[in-house]
Amino acid sequence: MENGLLVDMPAAPLRQGVAGKHAGGAVDRLLMVDGAAYLPTPAAVDSEWQASPAAHPREPPSSSRMASFVVEGGRRLEGRVRPAGNKNAALPCLAATVLADEPVTLENVPRIRDVETFLEIVSSLGATVEWTGPNEVTVDSRSVAIDTINRELAEGIRASLLLAGPLLARFGNVQLPPPGGDVIGRRRMDTHFLAFEALGASVELNGGFTISAKQLHGTDFFLDEPSVTGTENAIMAAVLASGRTRWRNAAAEPHVQDLCNLLNAMGARISGIGTHMLEIEGVPRLGGARFRIGSDHIETGSFIGLAAVTGSELVIEDAPMGHLDSTLLGFDRLGVQCTIQGGDLVVHGDRPHKIRQDAFGHVPKIDDGPWPAFPADLTSIALVTATQCEGTVLVHEKMFESRMYFTDKLVGLGASIILCDPHRAVVVGPSELRGGEVESPDIRAGMALLIAALGARGTSRIKNIRQIERGYERIDERLAQLGARIERVD
């Protein structure tokens, strides 16, 4: 088939498109602003919150970025821990509530900073937001009448971009400032824009993004990469488009699956959930629903690493077993043994960890990739775990070019790591870690440093814990319940 050829599928017309047909066209236009190359700079993520104290039970970012965890390491932990709801599912599901003409209630929502910030954005659009339980929130978006997102709020969280699809589908127009979030390398947004264009929208860069369409029409389109947020935006824009849409090369992560299942509960017609090809039959409206967010497989992987580094046997309750295949495979390669007992995962971190060599004695590799490969968000956790395992392993972070730079902080704590380039690090273990003072650069690296501090000899101070608390709910309290000596100091 020629790029750009229009074809008809049985029963419904679909517009065929591939990313390649935009070469030299839309992509070039999207990367240029007033004739100059568009190179977005990291947004300031320390903007002050202006919500009422009741909406944010813990300190706002301004105080949190000055707060620290003081950790006395070298102690074995024990007990049971339950992973929170999937942060990366909660955010797109909250965005999807903007599409509904009835209230939507989400259960098992993690009470973390990113969720609170996102709810503040949704509220600023005119929605009514109410926490109806410790981890249950109801959003009524019937009164939403604004298609423009506040710049200061958007700078606090990258997920603000997830509102582009719902607002475009609802109003036919949306204006967004550049999103903020973790600075872990280039995080391209072209997949979002190309998907919107395939549905019939126009995209203009003007210091932010203005996306508009008189009407969205179904399409058959190959996404240029299986971007998670790009796929989620494409799905939310297509559910109210006229006709049928097929997204090929779509992301299939557990959080994408949760979003699709919520939308179907609201009245959407999405098939192929969990695969890399999604088919969507557009519907005229979406209603209310009650939906439970799944347990976080990334937090589960973090607790596996925690058990291994501290030499502890921990029981992870209600672990998302169906989403742990690649995670368990990766940790098994490091010699970390786990067993399944009913709905619980038992991590035998108190046993010796010996890295499994590849055939003929070759150095093994842990590398990430699109689902169902080893999750990118766990490469930092796998790396710190490897420092306490016997042998040598190559950790290859393929998806974000700056995520490995935190390794110098681990080296400062005593780890034996060779940073080969922005994507690859060789870890030789085990190393005796010693306490020190480090700063959290992003959510996952921050958690990895906290795990290292808990396994280190002596006392450590973890600064900029705002980053950790963006993704891990009450982590200090939950670790203390396992026997960790950790104190939050403002």
Image (cartoon, rainbow, N blue to C red):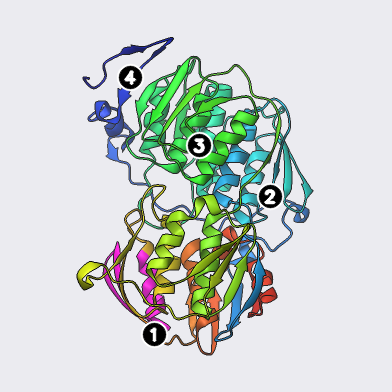
Magenta range = 404-426
**Residue 24 or residue 50, whichever sits in front:** 24
With 200 as the anchor, is 103 left or right in this view? right
**Residue 120 or residue 436, whichever sits in front:** 436
- Check residue 16 in the rendering and tell me which mark sits there, or answer none: 4
Residue on which disc 3 sits: 176
Residue on which disc 2 sits: 108
Q: Earlier in the sequence, mark 2 or mark 3?
A: 2
Is residue 120 in view? yes
- The residue under label 4 is which amino acid type? Gln
Q: Earlier in the sequence, mark 3 or mark 4?
A: 4
The residue drawn where x is 73% and y is 44% is 137
Camera-side mark, 3 or 4: 4
Camera-side mark, 1 or 3: 1
Residue 153 position, x and y percent, is 58, 47
Q: Earlier in the sequence, mark 4 or mark 2?
A: 4
Per the model, the C-alpha gap separating discs 3 and 4 is 28 Å
In magenta stretch: residue 421: yes
Instruction: Residue 393: name its quadrant.
Output: bottom left
In magenta stretch: residue 358: no
The answer to whether the residue labelled 1 contacts the one labelled 3, judged by CB atoms less than 8 Å apart, is no
Per the model, the C-alpha gap separating discs 2 and 3 is 28 Å
